[in-house]
Amino acid sequence: MAIIRFSDRPLFRNPWADFERMRREFDTLFHGLAPEYPGRPGGTVFPALNISEDADHLYVRAEIPGVKAADLDLSVEGDTLTISGERTTCPAGQQLSYHRREIECGRFNRAVTLPTKVNPDQVAAGFVNGVLTITLPKAAAVKPRKIEIKTQ
């Protein structure tokens, strides 16, 4: 049993030090449970997209190769845009042994919170060469308005 003299104790002890030690221990524990696969990218989000805006519209551009326009569903509810569909490029019924598999197939669903309110009745979408372009007009309440200053 170690004897610690009262005068050897630090004057101030960090109350968060134990939590930091526990976090490091959990990181070490969970790092050992998940084996790493060098050929498989981790945490990909499908479809990849860009969101941009101008004064009147939001533009969403999503790359969805290997999907037909008929297999896509778009919906706008409140300030959330949802893109869902199914990619059916995998051969059905075949037992294949993959050496590398980076292209997933099956159903996908991506919901994105839009930065401003939009008018859902005037949303337009186009699909050309695997690129989905969605034009969302901003709601009138969020568009900047020019106010005239009257002089007397």
Image (cartoon, rainbow, N blue to C red):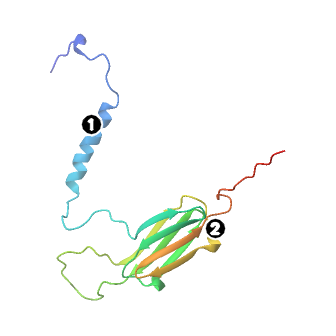
Give the residue furthest to the left.
1
Closest to the observer, 31 or 141:
141
- Marks 2/1: CA–CA distance: 50 Å
Query: Which of the labelled discs sits on residue 119, or is there none?
Result: 2
Q: Residues within 10 Å of mark 2 (few under 14, many from 20)?
A: some
The percent position of residue 67, horizontal first and vertical second, equals 40, 82
Could you tell me which residue is drawn at 26 percent across and 65 percent down?
41
Q: Which residue type does callout 2 highlight?
A: Asn
> Which numbered tag is attached to residue 21?
1
* Corner quadrant of residue 35: bottom left
Quadrant position of the C terminus in the picture: top right
Could you tell me which secondary element the residue under label 2 belongs to?
loop
Q: Which amino acid lies under the numbered mark 1 shown in the image of this protein?
A: Arg
Residue 92, quarter of the rendered image: bottom left
- Which type of secondary structure does the marked residue at label 1 adopt? helix
The quadrant in which residue 124 appears is bottom right
Q: Residue at x 20, y 16 (%)?
A: 4
Instruction: Residue 120 in the image: state x and y as whole percent.
Output: 62, 70
| Residue at screen point 46% across, 76% down | 132
Q: Give the vertical position of 23 relative to 44 (above or below).
A: above
Q: Nearer the viewer, mark 2 or mark 1?
A: 2
x and y percent of residue 24 in the render? Answer: 25, 41
Q: Quadrant of the N terminus?
A: top left
- N-terminal-most mark, 2 or 1: 1
Q: Position of residue 91 (x, y in %)?
A: 29, 87
Q: Is residue 54 left or right of residue 141?
A: left
Up the image or down, 17 lies above or below 120; here it is above
User: In this view of the protein, which residue sits in the foreground, 118 or 33?
Assistant: 118
Rendered residue at 59%/61% (across/down) = 55
